[in-house]
Image (cartoon, rainbow, N blue to C red):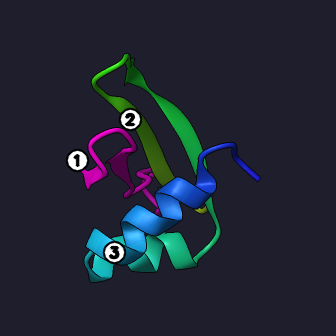
Amino acid sequence: MHKYEANVRYIVLKYGGYREKQIFKNPHTLERGETWNDLHKVIYVLPVQEDPDGYRAGFAVDIVTRSICG
């Protein structure tokens, strides 16, 4: 389990739409984003399975501002 999975789960369930909840419900990975400072800590939620063209349709969560940002 990722260190911040409980925080991400709370944000997705409270503020996420259908798309975010579907991605989170299926097998997914959490990856630390490039923005990581006192004001923003961004974590990418990406599906494990890629689309046939190689695209992974995920989204980003900021655990400091408690928002979905991508």
Q: Are marks 2 and 1 in contact (CB under 8 Å)?
A: yes
Looking at numbered disc 2 in the image, what kind of residue is underneath it? Val
User: Residue 56 magenta-drawn?
Assistant: yes
Q: Secondary structure at mark 2?
A: strand
Closer to the camera, 61 or 22?
A: 61
Dominant SS of magenta comes to: loop
Question: Mark 1 — residue?
Answer: 69
Residues under labels 2 and 1: Cα distance? 8 Å
Looking at numbered disc 3 in the image, what kind of residue is underneath it? Lys
Looking at numbered disc 1 in the image, what kind of residue is underneath it? Cys
Residue at x 51%, y 55% (from the top left corner): 7
Residue at x 60%, y 46% (from the top left corner): 4
Question: Mark 3 — residue?
Answer: 14
Q: Are marks 1 and 3 in contact (CB under 8 Å)?
A: no
Drawn side of residue 68 relative to residue 20, left or right: left
Residue 27 in view here: yes
Drawn side of residue 45 relative to residue 67, left or right: right
Residue at x 43%, y 80% (from the top left corner): 22
Residue at x 35%, y 38% (from the top left corner): 64
Drawn side of residue 11 relative to residue 50, left or right: left
Question: Mark 2 — residue?
Answer: 42
